[in-house]
Structure formats: C-alpha cells, structure tokens
Image: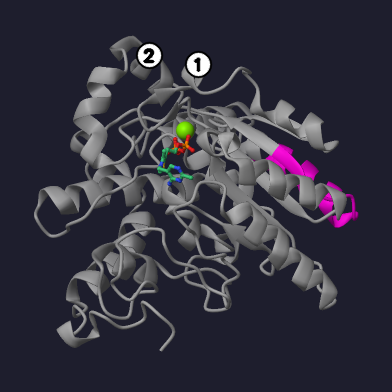
Amino acid sequence: MLLQLYLARYFDVRLIKEKKRGRLKGTLYSSHNQEAILVGSLFGLKSTDWISPIHRDMPAFFLKDARKGWRNPDRIGMTIQEVCAQVWGKAGSPGRARDNWSHIGSKKNRIIHSTSMLAGTIPAAAGVVLADRLNGGDALCVTYNGEGSTAQGVFHEAINFASVHKLPVITIIENNEWAYGTPNELGYSLDDFARRADGYGIPGLIADGQNVLDVYDKVMQCVEHARAGNGPSIVECKSFRAYGHGDHDDDRAAKYRPTEEVEAGRSRDPIAIMKRIMVERGALSPEDATKFMAENKGAAETDNSDFPPEVVAYLTEGVEFAVASPVPPAEEGGMWVFAE
Ligand SMILES: Cc1ncc(C[n+]2csc(CCOP(=O)(O)OP(=O)(O)O)c2C)c(N)n1
Ligand SMILES: [Mg+2]
C-alpha cells in the first residue's frame, strides 16, 4: 500500500515536471493528497471486480489489481504504458488520441468507460453488475465520484435503482471540499455525504480519506455487505483537493481559496500518515521511514530521490514508451467518432 501511495504521488509530480519540461501538453487533474482513497479502495477487490474512475482518479487505471504486482501480466488493470500513452495522446492509447485523460475504459480490464457527466458512471455501473449477475457472475463495482456528483439527479436515481435491486455497487464520494470553484457550503446543506445513504436504506460509511487503512477498512465492510447479497452502499472519504480543479485552474484556485485553508488541508499527507502508522506498529523502522521524503512537497520541491527506485523505474518505462510512441496519422481525425 505504501509503495502504491508513492507510485500514485509520483505519477502526479512526474507529469507536472514533464509538462514544465515541454515534453507533455494538455490539462492535468491532480490526485495529489487524495491517493489514499484510490489505493485503499482498490486494494481488497478481486481481479474480476469492476471500477469506474473519473478525472480525479487517473492512477486507478494502473493501480487496479496492482496488489498482484504492477508488472504481473495476469493483472486485470491497465499497464503504465497504456495510461502514459493516453496522457500523451499517442496512437495505440486506449482513447486513440482523442483525449489526454480519463475518457477511457476497458471491458477486458473491467474498467467502466468514464464519461464527463458527473455521476454518470453510477447507472452504468448498476447495469454492468446486473448484467454480470444475470450471466452468473459475482462481480461488484466501485464507482468514484467527487462530492459535486451528489447534487446530480442521476446520482439519486441510480443509487435508488441499485438499492431496490440489491446491486453490488459501492459509491465512493471523494469529499475534497471543492467542486471546481464552488466550496461545499454553497453546494449542499449537509456536512456528511454518507448520510445520503439514509434516503435509500443502505449503509453510508465515513472514512478518513487521508488514512489508507481506514479507507480500506470501510470499503471492505461494504464489499462484504455486497458479496453477501445485501446490495449497494456509500463510502464518503473526507479529503482535501490540494491544487486547482486542473492545472489550468491552479493560479485561480490560489486566489479563490484562503491560504490557511489550503495549508491545513494539505497538512495531513496520506504518505506521512501511513508511514507514521507503520512505524507505530513496528512494520517500518524510523530510519526507513525517512529514506524517501515525498510527503508534504509540491512537484517543484521533489526529485526522484524522494521516491523508491522501483516506483521511479516503473513510471519512467511508461513515460519513455509514451514519448517514443507515434501520434496518429492525420487521416484518422474523423474516425471512431461514430461507429465505423
Ligand atoms: C453534469 C455535469 N455538470 C458539470 C460538469 C462540469 N464539471 C466537471 S468536473 C466539475 C467539478 C466536480 O467537482 P467534484 O464532483 O467535487 O469532483 P472534484 O473535481 O472535486 O474531484 C464540474 C462542475 C460535468 N462534468 N458534468
Ligand atoms: Mg470535490
């Protein structure tokens, strides 16, 4: 789990550096400070389970089933090469260079294609697990949503449908306190989004989104609930969006959010929290805990020595693959927009 936290963080800072170097174009949506939500929720799933990540969750595409080993060819998740080719918008990427980010999916890897319609993946997830059940399967689906999604009509319709049919859909709400430039107090009249679950008669759990073990624990309670045939649930993960909505919004976000709020929100770094717990439990020596100091640093303050070498090596393979991959031929420009 700790290595996966480092990998997710390194993905974020490395892409920012690549863009600054002029080797990468396009908007980046940072998951910095929210990595524990992804790692903790994915860690206990079966290979055959489905996920539906969105813009904030890019590392989920390559962290899915990573417990088996990032390089394990039997892993049911995207490779780092596929994800980096996607970010670089290269030929052969899952999105065929139509986009540089999360508008991708994979039937083979059991990743539901993300749409840009907030909460739009929840009804799709309900349909996928219903189809799986009708085909004799026992797969569940973990859907990822910002708290902004909870204000969408389809959020309620889909979870209501899933609750009536007892479908194994676990809805993660990544409560990072901001939806683009809108603070939570201007968007909702409740503090705990987990309480939305009461309206559907399903469990609603709150996890400390900065503590990967707490996320794991709460999601696994919902996994057991789903596997026992009891249907859907919600896990709200309390977190904080460290930067702008995307990097195009970083400068504005620094103005629309008070500095003290941002500093307080970033201060509970998931890597530091995991290390502290491991040292307390004797799973990591205090010396080893200070070896790679990626925590509490923005991209500009870190370098490769802040990350374990296997993390840097794995991601570098993906980056080099993407940089060396060709762009698609121009005549493909109008293809795959409609069914060929
Ligand atoms: C239905 C819909 N309305 C508006 C948008 C534009 N939009 C994209 S992301 C976003 C903010 C999302 O905030 P939140 O759900 O809290 O996720 P976060 O970015 O904070 O992770 C908005 C308004 C959209 N994609 N879909
Ligand atoms: Mg948000």
- Residues at marks 2 and 1, CA–CA distance in whole angstroms: 14 Å
Q: Specify how the rendered protein is coloured.
A: one colour
Q: Place residue 309 in its image quadrant.
A: bottom left
Label 2 lies in ligand 2 vicinity (Cβ under 8 Å): no
Q: Main secondary structure of the magenta part?
A: helix
Any magenta on residue 231?
Answer: yes
Q: Amino acid at mark 2?
A: Glu
Horizontal and vertical percent position of residue 107: 58, 75
Which numbered circle lies on residue 82? none
Any magenta on residue 201?
Answer: no
Horizontal and vertical percent position of residue 10: 33, 48
* Circle 2 crowding by C-alpha within 10 Å: few under 14, some 14–19, many from 20: few
In the rendered structure, the answer to whether residue 36 lies left or right of residue 231 reads: left
Q: Return the disc, 2 or 1, that comes first in the chain's sequence.
A: 1
- For the question of whether residue 1 can be seen, the reply is no
Give the camera-side residue of 96 and 207: 96
Horizontal and vertical percent position of residue 19: 16, 51
- For the question of whether residue 40 can be seen, the reply is yes
In the rendered structure, the answer to whether residue 333 lies left or right of residue 37 reads: left
Q: Is residue 289 above or below residue 14?
A: above
Q: Is residue 198 above or below residue 1?
A: above
The residue that label 2 is drawn on is 261
Q: Which residues are magenta?
A: 216-234
Q: Secondary structure at mark 2?
A: helix
Q: Residue at x 29, y 30 (%)?
A: 297
Horizontal and vertical percent position of residue 119: 57, 47
Contact? badges 2 and 1 (CB < 8 Å) = no
Q: Secondary structure at mark 1?
A: helix
Which numbered circle lies on residue 185? 1
Mark count: 2
